[in-house]
Image: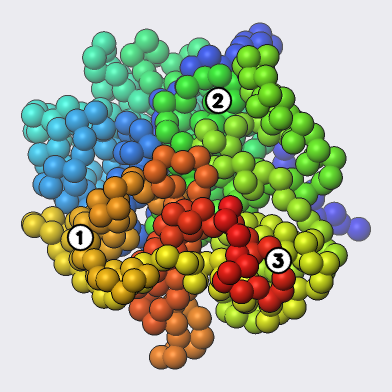
Amino acid sequence: MDHPHQKYCPIRPVNLADRQWPSRQITRPPQWCSVDLRDGNQALIEPMDSLRKHQMFEMLVAIGFKEIEVGFPAASQTDFDFVREIIEQNRIPADVTIQVLTQARTDLIARTFQALQGVRRAIIHVYNSTSEAQRRLVFRQDRAGIRRIAEQGARWVADHAARQPDTDWVFQYSPESFTGTELDFALETCGAVLEIWQPDAGREAIINLPATVEMTTPNVYADQIEWMHRQLPYRDHVILSVHPHNDRGTAVAAAELAVLAGADRVEGTLFGNGERTGNVDIVTLALNLYTQGIDPHLDFSRINEVVRVAETCNQLPVHPRHPYAGELVFTAFSGSHQDAIKKGLAARENDPAETPAWEVPYLPIDPRDVGRTYEAVIRINSQSGKGGIAHVMASEFGLDLPRRLQIEFRNEVQIIADSTGKEVKTADLWTIFEHIYLAVPGAHSLVDYREESHGQQDRLRRVRAVLRDAAGLDQVVTGIGRGPVDGFVHALAEGFGKPIEVIDYREHAIGPGSDARAAAYVELKIGGDDRSWHGVGLDEDATAATLRAILSAYARHAQQRGACSVEVPPTPQQCRSG
C-alpha cells in the first residue's frame, strides 16, 4: 500500500557544527521594513485602491516604520500611480525611505525607475528565483544561466541609478526561493551581485534572504542565515535581511532565530497578512521584544486603531485570538485564570513599589501599553439565564455589537439580573439597552450635519453639526478632520472643552435593501480619563448613525452612566449613576 507522505522529501540540515545562534540573546530590534503595501496587497482578494493605500501608508508612518515597500510599480498601474502620488505630493517624511520591487528584467527595471523620478531616497529591490526546482521546472536553466539573470539585473539597476544622481539609491537583491536554493549557489549568486554593486561605507547594499516558502523548522532557517552571514563578501557593508513566510506556521520563530543568527533586518506585514498563509507578523515580533524589555522602535500603543485600519484596508479580519491584538487576548474565561489575574492586578495596585516589573499571571503584557483597558480582562462566562446576550441582540434586533461592547453590556445586564433575581427576557433586554445607550438623560440630539472639503486638501473635511440639548436649545459646532467622524470629534472637543479620542468605531446595516438602517458603535476616551465610553447610534444615514453614537458616548461620560439596576423592565428614573 502506498503512503502519500512518502512523496515528500525532508530538507537536509546545514553542516554547521559550531553554530552560534542558540546561545545568543536579542538585545536590540532589527531594522523593520513593512511590505503591507506590496506583498500584503498582492495577496488580497481585492487589492487596495488609492484611498486605502494612502490610509495604510499613513498608518505605517505613524507606527514608526522607516522603510516601507510601497509597491511593484512596473507590474501595476495602481502601484505606479500611487508611487507617483506620494512623491509628487510630498507625502514621504524625511526620515522614511520607500522601497519598490522589480524582477531582474530590463523593461521592468526601466519602468520602476520612471516611477521613482524625483524621489529623495529609495530602495530598489531586484530579485530572481534561484531554487533548484525553479531552475529545473520553470526557467529550464542551469546555475550559470540563473546567475547571469541576477548579474544583468544588478547592472541594469546600477546603470539606471547613475542616470538619476540626485536620488540617494539603496540597492537590494533577493535570491527568491532562498530556502529551496543550495547554500553554495545562493552565496555564489549574491556574491556576483555584490561584485557589481561594490558596496562600501555609506553605500551599503541589502541582501535579502526570503523564506519564500517556509520549508523546514526554524532552527534550519537560522543555520542557513548564519552560514550566509559568515560567508557573504563585503559583509561589513551588507545589511543582511530576511523575509519569512508562514507556510509551516512558524514564521515568527524563524524570524527571531534568524536575527540571533546574524540578520540585521526583517521584512514583514501587520498581523502576518500575505500570500498563502501569510508573511511574518511584525506586530507579534515587535511586541515579543517589548515583553523582554526591549524598545521595538514601533508604536503599537493604540492597537485597536491599528487593527481597525488594517481590517479596513485589507478587508480581512484580525483573529480574536491574535497575539497582543485580538479582541479576546486580554480576556479570561477560566475561573482559576480569572482569580490569578485579579490577584496579580490587586498586588500591583496595593503596593506598586513592591512590583515594579510587570508580573501578572496569564498576561504577558500590560493591556494599557497597547491602548486596551482592564475592563475586558476578567469576563464572566455564566450561562445561568444571563448568557447569549450578544446572540439575542443580533438575532432579534439586528445589532452586531463589537466584542468590548458585548462585554460591557453583558456585565450591565448581569447587575440587573443579580439585583432582581428575575430572568431577563428579550423585550427587557432591549429596554435595558435603549436606556443605557440610546436614551441617555441630558444627551444632545443631532438635528442636522453637513460635511465638505477643507481647502485644497481632499483628505480633510469640515463638519458643521446642529445639536439640540435637553431644553430644546440648538447649538452649532464645527470641526476639521480626516473624515466626518474625525471632524465631528474635533467639533465636540472644541465645543464642549474636553479632548476626545476615538478608540474604535464600527458600523453595519440593519435590514435588507432600501429599508435598511445603519447601526454605529464607538468607543471614546474623554477628558484624559482612563475609562473608555461606548456609544450607539441608529439612523437611516450611516454617517448620522456614527455621529449619534459619539453623542451617546459623550452623554454617558457626562452623566457617568452605568447600568439600570432596580427592576426589569427599568424606567429612566431607575437608571443609576456609575
**Residue at the spot of label 2:** 289
Place of residue 109 in the rendered image (x, y in percent of width and height, measured from the top left): 23, 43
Q: Is residue 481 left or right of residue 47?
A: left
Residue 146: percent from left, percent from top:
40, 37
What amino acid does circle 2 point to? Leu
Point out residue 486 in the picture as x, y percentages from the top left corner: 30, 56
Mark 2 crowd level (few <14, some 14–19, many ≥20, 10 Å Cα): some
Q: What secondary structure is found at the residue carrying circle 2?
A: helix
Q: Amino acid at mark 3?
A: Val
- 2 or 1: mark nearer the eye: 1
Q: Which quadrant of the rendered structure holds the N terminus?
A: bottom right
Other-residue count near label 1 (Cα within 10 Å), few / some / many at <14 / 14–19 / ≥20: many
Residue that extends furthest to the bottom in the rendered view of this protein: 514
Q: Nearer the viewer, residue 451 or 202?
A: 451
**Image point (26%, 22%), residue name:** 197
Viewer-side residue, 268 vs 222: 268
Q: Is residue 61 above or below residue 356?
A: below
Q: Which residue is identified by label 3?
A: 566
- The circle on residue 478 is 1
Q: Earlier in the sequence, mark 3 or mark 2?
A: 2
| Picture coordinates of residue 568, whole percent (x, y) | 71, 74
